[in-house]
Amino acid sequence: VTSLLIDYLGGELARETVATLHKHLRDCPDCVAFLNTYRTTVQATRSLRYEDIPARLKDRLRRSLREQIKRASARR
Ligand SMILES: [Zn+2]
């Protein structure tokens, strides 16, 4: 998921994945705040570092996205 966020910021995600991520962002202010901060940081430094993402946020995002992807594929 960390790489997912980084790909997202780099505009390198598949459209389906972006849609899932956007759904998640709607009810996860933590990730929204993180993305906003991260975007600014990336623009300032032009560097992406995985370790910049707090572990707690990584866990939470991973769990939530996994659930949403599971739900989305169960609907098919
Ligand atoms: Zn989140």
Image (cartoon, rainbow, N blue to C red):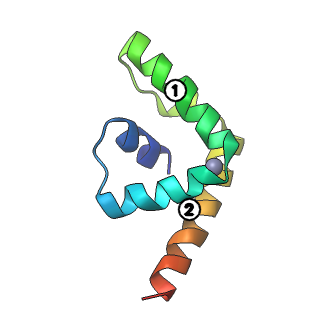
Establish if 51 lies above or below 63.
Answer: above
Closer-to-camera residue (59/30): 30
Q: Which three-letter amino acid code belongs to the residue tagged 2?
A: Leu
Q: Residue at x 43, y 49 (%)?
A: 4
Q: Residue at x 68, y 40 (%)?
A: 30
Q: Residue at x 42, y 10 (%)?
A: 44
Task: State the image coordinates of residue 20 (x, y, percent, origin top left).
Answer: 47, 62
Establish if 67 lies above or below 48.
Answer: below
Task: State the image coordinates of residue 60 (x, y, percent, origin top left).
Answer: 68, 53
Q: Residue at x 54, y 28 (%)?
A: 36
Compared across the picture, whether 21 is left or right of 61 comes to left
Image quadrant holding the C terminus, namely bottom left
**Mark 2: C-beta under 8 Å from nearest atom of ligand 1:** yes
From mark 1 to mark 2, how far is it between C-alphas?
A: 19 Å
Establish if 74 lies above or below 11.
Answer: below
Identity of the residue furthest to the front in this view: 26
Q: According to the image, label 2 marks what residue?
A: 65
**Neighbourhood count class around disc 1 (C-alpha, 10 Å): few under 14, some 14–19, many 20 upward:** some
Q: According to the image, label 1 marks what residue?
A: 38
Identity of the residue furthest to the top in this view: 44
Q: Which three-letter amino acid code belongs to the residue tagged 1?
A: Tyr
**Neighbourhood count class around disc 2 (C-alpha, 10 Å): few under 14, some 14–19, many 20 upward:** some
Task: State the image coordinates of residue 54 (x, y, percent, origin top left).
Answer: 65, 35
Task: Give the mark nearest the N terminus, 1 or 2.
Answer: 1
Establish if 9 lies above or below 21.
Answer: above
